[in-house]
Image (tube, rainbow, N blue to C red):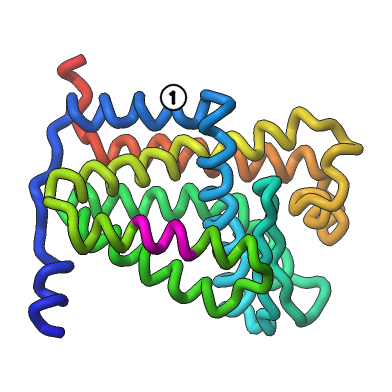
Amino acid sequence: MREFWDTITATQTVPDAPWLIGAGFVALALVVWRTSWRTVRLGVTVVHEAGHAVVAVLVGRRLSGIKLHSDTSGVTLSRGKPSGPGMVAMLAAGYLAPALLGLLSATMLAAGHALGLLWLLVAAMLVLLVWVRNGYGLVVLLVLGAALGAISWYADDRIQTTAATLVTWLLLLASPRPLLELLGRGERGRRGSDPDQLAGLTGIPSVLWILVLLAVNVAGLVVGVQTLIPDLSWI
């Protein structure tokens, strides 16, 4: 066990700026391209629902379960007070979770802990397995966890660092897109969404909630880029 711990906490070589930027463009293409976006969005949904679940527990709500659907949507079920700051925090956490996890990933990657990041994600998948409540969600978590686990256990340092870098970029770059999509749906298309529920709880229009969450995600992207590539003066 100690040997395993020493392995996952060991540092790997941090990629240089040109390589990181190239990986960022690859991730951006995956986010922008409609065909690949569906798969990326499913991963973002996993993080989104995990954000709801973690904050629900932190604010004292009773977590009932998580469901993931084939249309890339998801839902987190919890019991507790239907209003108040805790409920607001839980609802807001979903759209903020990918950017926050992206920032954590960028920090770990910049510190040379690519392998540690991968194992952290595997551990998160294992925890989510306890709370998933439908077959499709179970399959998604098993596939993601198995893929990340295989890379973490069998791949060499170069592949592990590449995987950790792509995951980090995808989290940072993908976090604003669901909010942009929601913004484009119009008021009717936003009914039942997290911002719509936040509007009902606070009296602040859903479009303003979307803009606030979007601004935070964009700020997270900027900080994440600065963390990964502190000096872009060579461009």
Confirm whether the magenta stretch covers residue 143.
yes
Find disc 1 in the rendering and name its residue: 29
Where is residue 150 drawn, in percent x and y? 28, 60
- Extreme residue in the top direction: 235
Q: Is residue 235 left or right of residue 192?
A: left
User: Residue at (65%, 47%) from the top-left corner?
Assistant: 72
| Quadrant into which the C terminus falls | top left
Asked whether 217 or 159 is in front, the reply is 159
Amino acid type indicated by mark 1: Ala
- Exactly how many numbered labels are in the figure? 1
Confirm whether the magenta stretch covers residue 146.
yes
Asked whether 113 or 100 is in front, the reply is 113
Where is residue 54 drawn, in percent x and y? 55, 71
Q: Quadrant of residue 131?
A: bottom right
Specify start and end residues of the magenta stretch as a single range.
142-147
10 Å neighbourhood of mark 1: few (<14), some, or many (≥20)? some
Could you tell me which secondary element the residue under label 1 belongs to?
A: helix
User: Residue at (33%, 40%) from the top-left corner?
Assistant: 166
